[in-house]
Amino acid sequence: MSVHTPADYLELARAENDSAALHRLARCPYPFVWQAVAANPSTAPGTLLELSTAQDSAWNDNRLLRLLSEHPSADHAVLRAVRDAVAAKLAAGERPYGAVLALAGRTELTAAEVRQLGTLRGASARLRSQLDQRLGLRT
């Protein structure tokens, strides 16, 4: 398939199962393609790690971070990078709450690593409550 339009990139990012091709797609300039790559179960941890530093807008960045934190192949390095990106956003007053709560369900990170996110400027009382609840479900 030759890629000509943003829609072609998106279709390929959703359907591709070759990790090298997904890595190339992660470098395209479209945040909706980054999100499709992050949602694709065939994406390798190295590509996920690279995507953890991608930036576009608050809404797109927060969605990307949530998708990365939910990815089944996200290893400890990826999840730490996502946690650090989420911490920076919270400290700046942004609200990447979906990513925070997804990280709370990942046992690759310690509860303390995730709980610290609730102490940052952008964390609301409701987020802290939900975070405590999610961390309490870990066994």
Image (cartoon, helix red, strand yellow):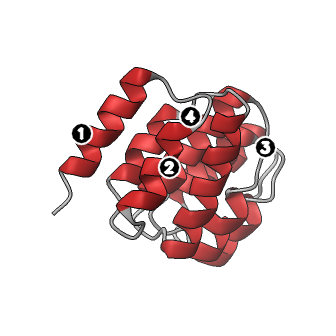
Q: Mark 2 points at which residue?
A: 116
Q: Name the residue under label 3.
A: 55
In this rendering, the answer to whether 64 lies above or below 108 is: above
Q: Are marks 2 and 1 in contact (CB under 8 Å)?
A: no
Question: Which of the marked residues, 3 or 4, is nearer the chain's N terminus?
Answer: 3
Residue 16 image-quadrant placement? bottom right
Q: What residue type is labelled 4?
A: Pro
Look at discs 2 and 3 and give the one toward the viewer.
2
Q: Name the residue under label 1.
A: 133
Look at discs 1 and 4 and give the one toward the viewer.
1
Residue 91 percent across, percent down from the top left: 68, 37
Q: What residue type is labelled 2?
A: Gln
Q: Mark 4 points at which residue?
A: 96
Q: Circle 1 — which element?
A: helix
Q: Residue at x 58, y 46 (%)?
A: 65
Question: Which of the marked residues, 2 or 3, is nearer the chain's N terminus?
Answer: 3
Badge 4: residue crowd in 10 Å (few <14, some 14–19, many ≥20): many
Q: Distance between the residues labelled 2 and 1?
A: 14 Å
Question: Which of the marked residues, 2 or 4, is nearer the chain's N terminus?
Answer: 4
Q: Distance between the residues labelled 2 and 4?
A: 14 Å
Q: What residue type is labelled 1?
A: Gln
Q: Residue at x 63, y 35 (%)?
A: 90
Of residues 104 and 72, the one nearer the viewer is 104
